[in-house]
Amino acid sequence: MTQVVSSAERFAQGQDRRKQMRRVEHKTWKGKDRRESALRLLRASTRGRVPALVALKNQLMAVSPFGYFRGAVPVMAYDLSLISNTGICNQLCGDAHVRNLGAFAGPDGRIVFDINDFDETIVAPFEWDVKRMAVSLVLASREAGGKDLQGSEAASVFLASYRASMTAFAKMPVLEVARYQVRRLGSVSPVGGILRMAERATPAHTLATLTEVKKGVMGGGPQRIFKTIPPTLKRVTGVAADKVVGSLKMYAGSLQPERRHFLAQYKVVDVAFKVVGTGSVGLRDYVVFMEGNGAKDPLFLQIKEEVASGYAAYVGRPAVKSGRGHEGQRVVNGERAMQLQSDPFLGWTTMDGRDYLVRQLNDHKASIKLAELKESELVEYAAVCGEMLARGHARAGDAAMVAGYMGSSGRFDDAVCAFAEGYANQTEADWKELVRSLKTTGKKAVGKKTAK
């Protein structure tokens, strides 16, 4: 058998990485080091997207600095590549921010709370996820009306929680890390609210929200079909719908056999095109309405186009190839690696040469609402963010090496907190630039060079 390096040795290797990048260096952010403009990076990221939806993406990003941050992964990925890194690579969420933790239904039907967005997942320096989450907490505090001191406190609590959790994981038996659950979630006020929302977000609720009964569809009697809700939901029929349905054959092959058996008991009823998220707006996203054991047994699948991670251009080839060339599979692999439990219908497919992720739509899904968040609740929530991100990194990476690098002092925390404040300021400046460009060019600045 292959000789395994001990946890103590890996911890020491992490300590040695401080020679490559001192912990205090993590505070560094200098906007003047940029050789590319944020607008140009955003414009490049929209190539290949549905041109008519790029303007909508711009508008969503222009709502607030936090909204901009959600859609600006390509900008932060570029910025992080300009800074030294630890070289301690880990499976990343890639888009770690406060709204990308949420609730969903696990395979056993119970509500799970975890990181739940992996479009940008990739193997890269662990601190890139940590820095992005810390920045998001500063921006979230500002959006909720808090002062800089409160945002800084939230970031500090997150970082201390992440470091303490990673230190604990480094000492645990391997299978305990794999099975580790955060037991106190129900008592954390913001998370408790998310879990209560998730209880109500059932397939039956989705059925009532997104579908309606129409007479004379395809020349037949009354039939339940997708509503048309401009600009976010539109029925797809004819050849386009046939392609979507046809892609389910490849998707079924990506599932485990028992789950493929369950899927086979559902029949397709209708197909629609749906606009989702902020960063994903403009990518092709379809939803499929299916029925199993009668009209009261709906299943909604989301077939979501996946392109290369925003970090792909800045990491080595082995990391880029982690998904064996299929972007949907890349996302599935990253999600399964980091989550304690994953959507039982998580898989991938291909249509017209484009890669897609497939998962359930809105099955008990819910996430935090920043507008309703109190200052004290953000700090409480930040501690959960730290524990959750550490668990994901420990499951998919080397907790001992990361813990060894960070150490027992607050040096790493203080440096990343300083970075978060500086980068939040940069994000606000970039957001203002986007807003000005939209006013100047009729809301098409970022997307004016999209593919035809």
Image (spheres, grey):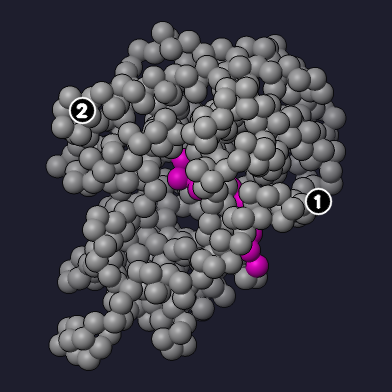
Magenta residues, start to end: 110-120
The mark nearer the N terminus, 1 or 2, is: 1
Total numbered labels placed on residues in the image: 2
**Secondary structure under the numbered disc 2 in the rendered image:** helix
Q: Residue at x 28, y 46 (%)?
A: 282
Residue sitting nearer the eye, 365 or 208: 208
The residue under label 2 is: 439
Residue 420 relative to residue 248: left or right: right
In the image, residue 188 sits, relative to residue 348, either above or below, namely above
Nearer the observer: mark 1 or 2; the answer is 2
* Spatial CA span between label 1 and label 2: 54 Å
The residue under label 1 is: 176
In the image, residue 6 sits, relative to residue 39, either above or below, namely below
The 10 Å Cα crowd at callout 2, few under 14, some 14 to 19, many 20 or more, is few
Residue flagged by tag 1: what amino acid is it? Glu
User: Does residue 291 show up?
Assistant: yes
**Secondary structure under the numbered disc 1 in the rendered image:** helix
Quick check: marks 1 and 2 in contact, CB under 8 Å?
Answer: no
Residue 77, position as x, y percentages in the image? 45, 27
Magenta stretch: includes residue 116: yes
Q: Quadrant of the N terminus?
A: top right
Residue 10, position as x, y percentages in the image? 78, 29
Residue sitting nearer the eye, 118 or 125: 118
Quadrant position of residue 153: top right
The 10 Å Cα crowd at callout 1, few under 14, some 14 to 19, many 20 or more, is few
In the image, residue 267 sits, relative to residue 93, either above or below, namely below
